[in-house]
Image (tube, rainbow, N blue to C red):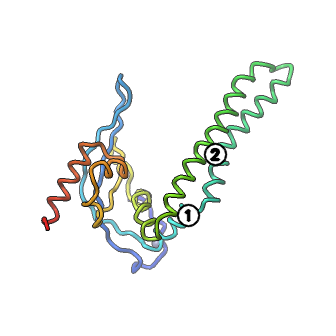
Amino acid sequence: MKPVSCTHEASHRVAMPFQEVLTMHVRALSGEHRVQALGEVIQAPVCLSCLKEYVALKTDAKRAKRQLLLRHGLISLAGALLLLFTQLPSIGRIALLPGVFALGFGILGYLRAQKEAEARHKGLMALDEAGRQRALLPDFIRHQLPDKAGENDLSYIPIDEELASLSTAALMARYGLLKEIAGQLKSKLAGATPPS
Ligand SMILES: [Zn+2]
């Protein structure tokens, strides 16, 4: 278990069921591909107050922008410095290409990341608070539970009333599942709940 920094009272925590997903990235000559399997269904304590704070943090657009600027700003700065070095006779044009690359990489990377962040933010803000909590719960729980099991990456799918009604395609898109695994999850869920 990872250390959980929750300082709230135990009454804020509720046990929720999650489906473990194991994903292994296999590098082959044909490129990288994923191997996936469903793990166990686990019960994990979720602190509702921490989840609320996490949602507030993740929907803070200004904070996200600052982080992106910092991340991409450094590489742009390095690029700008390299371009300045081209003015020095001892270095000259040798720094030109890497400088242009770093500057371009930093700026383009920032623009792309910012666009993605904006789309994500817009999507989250279109939901109500409960919807935002539901959407961010898989990320949140990944910070609380182990994210590795040997070679495998671990992720967790909250098992709620909505899950059984999702299509295979929706499961794939929302939880990054391979088609076969999404199908397995669907039949597992169908088996767990009696037909109505
Ligand atoms: Zn807490």
What's the mark number on residue 193? none
Mark nearer the N terminus (1 vs 2): 1
Q: Nearer the viewer, residue 130 or 53?
A: 130
Q: Residue at x 67, y 48 (%)?
A: 70
Residue for badge 2: 71
Q: Is residue 81 above or below residue 41?
A: above
Quadrant of image for the C terminus: bottom left
**Which element type, helix, strand or loop, lies under badge 2?**
helix
64 displayed left or right of 171: right
Identify the amino acid type marked 1: Leu
Tell me where residue 73 appears, x and y as whole percent: 69, 43
**Which element type, helix, strand or loop, lies under badge 1?**
helix
33 displayed left or right of 69: left
Residue for badge 1: 57
Q: Is mark 2 within 8 Å of ligand 1?
A: no
Q: Is residue 152 above or below residue 56?
A: above
Q: Badges 1 and 2: C-beta atoms under 8 Å apart?
A: no
31 displayed left or right of 98: left
The mark tally for this picture is 2
Few, some or many C-alpha atoms within 10 Å of disc 1 (few <14, some 14-19, many ≥20)? few
Asked which quadrant contains residue 71, the reply is top right
Identify the amino acid type marked 2: Arg
Tell me where residue 158 appears, x and y as whole percent: 33, 61
Quadrant of image for the N terminus: bottom left
Q: Nearer the viewer, residue 45 or 128?
A: 128
Q: Is residue 62 above or below residue 113?
A: below
Few, some or many C-alpha atoms within 10 Å of disc 2 (few <14, some 14-19, many ≥20)? some
Q: Is residue 98 above or below residue 35?
A: above
Tell me where residue 95 appears, x and y as whole percent: 75, 23
Q: Residue at x 80, y 21 (%)?
A: 91
Q: CA gap, disc 1 to disc 2?
A: 18 Å
Asked which quadrant contains residue 87, the reply is top right
